[in-house]
Image (spheres, rainbow, N blue to C red):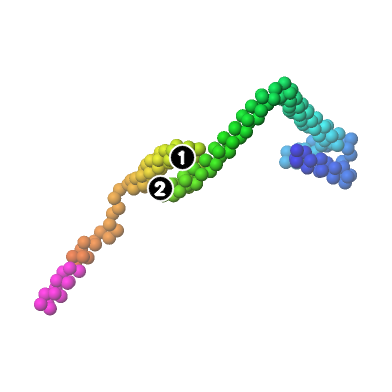
Amino acid sequence: MPDLIDEVKDENQDSAGGNQDADQKPEESKDTDTPKTFSQEEVNEIVSKRLGETKAKTEEMISKKLQEAEAEWERKAKLTAEEKAKEESERRTSELAQKERDIAIRENRAEARDILAEKKISSELVDWVIDADLDITKSNIEKLEKVWNKAIEEGVNAKMVGKTPTDPQPDSTKQTDEKTSVKDLLYRKKG
């Protein structure tokens, strides 16, 4: 829709500037880089078509929601006082259970972050292990720890694969032998 508005603004600026009459259609240019321009009638037609489609969808959605609300109202009107009270009680029970579940998940998330920190696993993974039941959360953490450690071990082993590093000084044994012999000579002279 913003693209259409920009096109309409451009068209209005062109026709206000006298570049093109609203009745004339733009000439086809050989350049494919220039955007297509629309006459005011074409823009009005495009806008009307899109507005009509949007209006039809909105009206259909509103009509459907009204029918659903009316059907629900009629259903509730037929209920007895006992049935209404029972239904209200079930709704409250359901809401309460959902709130309790949300609180349990929030508490377990905090516990899981602590456990992950102890095991030196990123706390960003807490959403992968969290559950409303703390035992399931702990079980998920244990499974994650096994996979995590295995992946780290495989990564380290993959980095260590290769040939053994060579000594950068191939004559290093000769140098130590020479140093030792010089020390021996000095020691012998003193002694």
Most common secondary structure along the magenta stretch: helix
Q: Is residue 190 magenta?
A: yes
Q: Which residue is mark 1?
A: 134
Q: Is residue 111 above or below residue 85?
A: below
Kindly tell me whether residue 64 is visible in this rendering.
Answer: no
Separation (CA) of disc 2 from disc 1? 17 Å
Magenta span: 179-191
Q: Which residue is mark 2?
A: 119
Q: Residue at x 22, y 65 (%)?
A: 175
| Residue 106 on image: x %, y % | 53, 43
185, 156: nearer the viewer: 156
| Residue 4 on image: x %, y % | 77, 38
Residue kind at label 1, given as amino acid type: Leu
Q: Residue at x 40, y 42 (%)?
A: 145
40, 25: nearer the viewer: 40
- Please tell me whether mark 1 sits on a helix, a strand or a loop: helix
Q: Is residue 102 left or right of residue 143?
A: right
Q: Is residue 189 magenta?
A: yes
